[in-house]
Image (cartoon, rainbow, N blue to C red):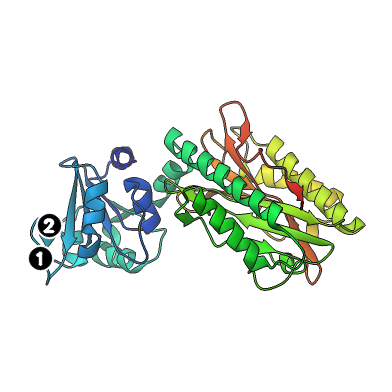
Amino acid sequence: MLNNLRILAENRNLDVVLIAAPDNLDYYTDVPSLGDALGLLVYDRRSDSLSLYVPLLEYQRYRDKLPDTVNVYALSKTLKPSGISVIEADWKDIIKQYASDKIGVDLSHSGPLQKTLQQVLGEKAVDVSDDIWKQRMIKSNRELEAIKRAVRITIKGVLAVQSSIREDITETQLVGVFEKTVRDNGVSKLAFDPIIAFKPNNAYPHAVPGERRVSSRDLVLVDVGVKVDNRCSDITRMILYGRPSPEEKKSIEAVVEAVEAGIDSVAPGVKAGDVYNTAVKILEKYGLKEYFIHGLGHGVGVVVHEPPYLRLGSETILEPGMVFTIEPGVYFPGKYGVRVEEVVVVTKKGRKVLSRRLDGVLEAF
């Protein structure tokens, strides 16, 4: 992805591009950022050079993983181990040395280093955040393969949860089942904290699993994802434990129909907002529109929530290579919630559902 920085600089006729946001560092370097560690990636078009500045303790990890064409430097004013390119400077000093009237910076993220960039560069900074998002929205073949593998492993985790549901098991215990399964399949990092929720906890779109035990006629909402090669998956399924009530059955049927209608409307050239409208019309037909309280979907990539967003009024035009979720849901506080989520990629002729191997609604064995 490093070459995308060159393309960005050329397209915008910039001398320098500075990247500091952790997820953008992940995207361009293909090296996962850890915790709150800072880093500054610089492409200098004048010399066609790539440089990365990191704290000393992060130096060796990046140096071992990046090609030799990237100059890696460690910032330290005290420790200077041999064999390491140490620079005795502050972040402000590094930024100042690249000063130019045509310098691109991602201003869409917040953080201490982004704040420093704005303080040092002021009005000289050209905001390239939209350019970066446009690059990130169109997945490369390598990214698509990573997302597909992430989806396959996530499905294994959901099936393990399905087969583990039994009388008196808790939400937290099922979270443990999912985590063990995906880690046994080589996953080192989850895309987000798993959501496994029984009634009425699943009436919260972002439910927090706890010690609630499954009941005799329950709806089990499973919203989970993993990271493979630094790319995410995100799948939601409903698992029936016992027979649902007529009201619950209607909600499930409506959500599943809305998912399918949304998927069928996906194609190159379609507005993201139109996909949203198509799915909502189905919920409206069932009299459930007012219980749908979030967007229809979001992009998945380096992070689990990124553009494009399938929201009301979104003017984003879908293009081949975009990967996003479609996840309508209905929520009844104090009673229950239903959500089904698929991962979809836009193709040249239409769309492909990457998570199709797993039915939207499952039954506990």
Q: Position of residue 142 (x, y in %)?
A: 43, 36
Report the front residue among 169 and 145.
169
Left or right: 30, with 227 as reference point = left
Which numbered disc covers residue 168? none
Question: Quick one: quadrant of the N terminus?
Answer: top left
Q: Secondary structure at mark 1?
A: loop
Q: Which residue is mark 1?
A: 80
Q: How many neighbours does mark 1 have within 10 angstroms: few (below 14), some (14-19), or many (20 or more)?
A: some
For the question of whether residue 20 can be seen, the reply is: yes
Report the front residue among 317 and 359.
359
Disc 2 marks a residue whose amino acid type is Ile
* Residue at point 76%, 62% (across, down): 337
Residue 117 occupies quadrant: bottom left
* Residue at point 23%, 49% (across, down): 64
For the question of whether residue 291 can be seen, the reply is: no
Q: How many neighbours does mark 2 have within 10 angstroms: few (below 14), some (14-19), or many (20 or more)?
A: some
Q: Position of residue 343 (x, y in %)?
A: 61, 43
* Residue at point 79%, 65% (across, down): 336
Residue 217 occupies quadrant: bottom right
Q: Which residue is mark 2?
A: 84
- Asked if labels 2 and 1 touch by Cβ distance under 8 angstroms, the answer is yes
Q: Secondary structure at mark 2?
A: loop
**Distance between mark 1 and mark 2 Cα atoms:** 7 Å
Disc 1 marks a residue whose amino acid type is Lys
Q: Can you say whether 27 is above or below 123 in the image? A: above
Q: Position of residue 153 (x, y in %)?
A: 55, 45
Report the front residue among 18 and 60.
60
